[in-house]
Amino acid sequence: MMAQTYKRQLSGGSNDTLTVAALAVLAAITVTVAHEAVGHGSVCLAVGGRVTLLTTSLFRCDVPSFLIDLSGPFTSLAVAAVAALAATVTRETRPGLTLYLVLVAAMAGFWEGAYLVQAVLTRHGDLYSVWTGLAGEATVAVRVGGAAVGAAIYLATVVFASRMLAGTLVEPRKAARTAWAAATVATVAAALIYRGGVGENLINTMLEIGAASLPLLLIPRRANGAATARPIRRSVPVIGLAAMAWLGFALTMGLGIVG
């Protein structure tokens, strides 16, 4: 009886909307910085190049290399894998941290899965450039295979995000929708102040975070094992950190770093 009462206490209440939104903003910034700055940027510097443009979705280096093209997607998928594994460890005791980790894994997986499909179908993008740089123009079979791999990554991410959020959070669908909206608004708002003007950068930013992560709007309503689901409580430090992180993100990658 005491155990059942304790479980009901753990599952009581609702998630704090501001904290959920803040965690989503931090996750979106993490994913964007990992792909563009850490991935592309670090390899550009490693091969002796100089970063000439870094924004929320655009990257340019003055030294061409297939390694630079590969490093963005590779870093994103590595970050997604680490975040997904970490989320399985924290899911029982740290709902806020788990949400952040799941969102990082989900946004990165959605981005790269959808991006791979787009790249092979349109013959444009990081991974398509890697293939053509190494093996020449992709055949129809290669393009179909690439699209299949991208779709598999995307669908696996859908399954992972749905199971983790529905099995961990109180009101999982509401939390996921709040997270999607906050992440989309935050990244788009940063892209809108790009000194190069609206256009390709804004469109890419909307596609990579907002459009790619639309499955977050379809997370199941009820948590599996809802009796032990813990609500995300108000965290002023997390909200403050998200605000400061977004300001720094907006004033750097939002405005655009030009070398």
Image (cartoon, helix red, strand yellow):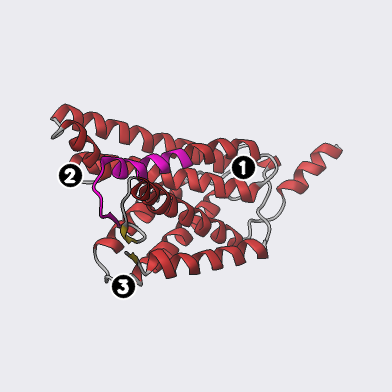
Task: Provide residue 96's location: percent of width, then percent of height.
Answer: 63, 51
Q: What amino acid is found at the position of numbered circle 3 in the picture? A: Arg
Q: Can residue 102 be seen in this view?
A: yes
User: Which callout, 3 or 2, points at the residue further toward the start of the chain?
Assistant: 2
Magenta stretch bounds? 59-79
Instruction: Give the numbered dot on residue 168.
Output: 1
* Mark pair 3, 2: CA separation: 27 Å
Q: Quadrant of residue 53?
A: bottom left
Please name the residue shown 39% across and 44% down the image.
110
Mark 1 or 3, closer to the camera: 3
User: Callout 3 environment at 10 Å: few (<14), some (14 to 19), or many (20+)?
Assistant: few
Chain-order first, disc 2 or disc 1:
2
- Asked whether 77 or 64 is in front, the reply is 64
Q: Where is residue 132 in the image (x, y as percent from the top left)?
A: 18, 36
Say what amino acid the circle numbered 1 marks: Thr
Tell me, for residue 122, which label it has, or none.
2
Q: Is mark 1 on a helix, strand or loop?
A: helix
Question: Residue 195, which numbered label?
Answer: 3
Are the residues at dot 2 and dot 1 in contact (C-beta closer than 8 Å)?
no
| Mark toward the viewer: 2 or 1 | 2
In this rendering, would 159 be left or right of 142?
right
Q: Does the magenta stretch include residue 10?
A: no
Question: Residue 28, how many percent across, how many down?
Answer: 46, 55
